[in-house]
Image (cartoon, rainbow, N blue to C red):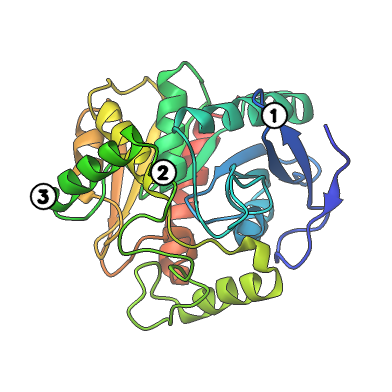
Amino acid sequence: MAVARPLEGDGGPPGGHARYLTALDGVRIRLGHWPAPEGGKGHVLILPGRTEYIEKYGLVARDLHAAGWGSFALDWRGQGLADRAFSDGLKGHVGDFAEFQRDLDVALDAIRDIAGARVPWLAHSMGGCIALRGLIRGKTPPAIAFSAPMLGLSNPAGQLRALGLVAGLARLFRLDNGYAPTTGPTYGIATERFEGNKLTTDPEQYARMKAQIAAEPRFGLGGPSLRWMGAALREMAALAQAPSPAIPALFGLGLDEAIVGPTQIRARVANWPGAELVEYPGARHELLMERAEIRDDFLGRSMALFARHAS
């Protein structure tokens, strides 16, 4: 593993640092670590969503630390300070979602060396999609909490079918490296106002995220490539046909969700023995960046689940 460097400007607990890891295909990703307090309960692995980066979860790490937990978080390939596919670093791209499993594998190997045990997972949005595939592949965290997992998208079904068709044709002719329709380099939080945003109802959290990207522009990410979109649609369709793993699970969903598909989340919970679904009226996509009462409730429920099933 590469030399660890301090995490700065994240609001997390003391001692936070990040290091680079190299996946089997040579792509560098980044692993953040906030150590557990002395005599603590263990660690939690945070699996971020699309566009996110380690430092965004500093306040979550702070709250986990206050409750006795250390934490890890990832910069997936193509975002944060991990390697990006194109000179246009604002284009979110992956060739196939199987590539994210290489990131997960190398991260879990490093975490096992550092923490010495399996750790529970806290997975948001795209991170939830990647996590579910990891579980199906045989990964066995003691428990997992999903925040608005990307198991489907909120777009109308006809629009998604058309997008999948376009992505498939573009892939066939190797023309799918451009931005997905209606997106572009300025598609994202860095240029969008709080009013009308789909992420959170908390203006302070929104301002904090914008400030982090302004301070470190490399955190910024625009729209996904058409290749990313096609790969995501194929992966979500494949996961919908897979059985649920025997892992204790909690799902959180805001009732003002406008990015991922609530129908697919509820269907997964209904077919996951023992899984719990908590729905939050008035909450948007990012429960862990929401108003304090929502954020604290979901994180508190997650930690209670983790404590019940600690290694």
Q: Which amino acid is tagged 1?
A: Gly
- From the viewer's perspective, tell me whether residue 235 is left or right of residue 88: left
- From the viewer's perspective, tell me whether residue 123 is left or right of residue 180: right
Quadrant assignment for the C terminus: top right
Label 1 CA crowd tier, 10 Å (few <14, some 14–19, many 20+): few
Q: Tell me which residue sits at (23%, 42%) in the image.
A: 164
Is residue 63 visible from the viewing direction of this image? no
Q: Secondary structure at mark 1?
A: loop
Q: Nearer the viewer, residue 69 or 55?
A: 55
- From the viewer's perspective, tell me whether residue 225 is left or right of residue 80: left
Q: Which residue is mark 1?
A: 26
Mark 3 and mark 1 lie on one chain; the one further toward the N terminus is 1
Q: Which residue is mark 3?
A: 158
Q: Which residue is mark 2?
A: 228
Q: Which amino acid is tagged 3?
A: Gly
Quadrant assignment for the N terminus: top right
Mark 1 and mark 2 lie on one chain; the one further toward the N terminus is 1
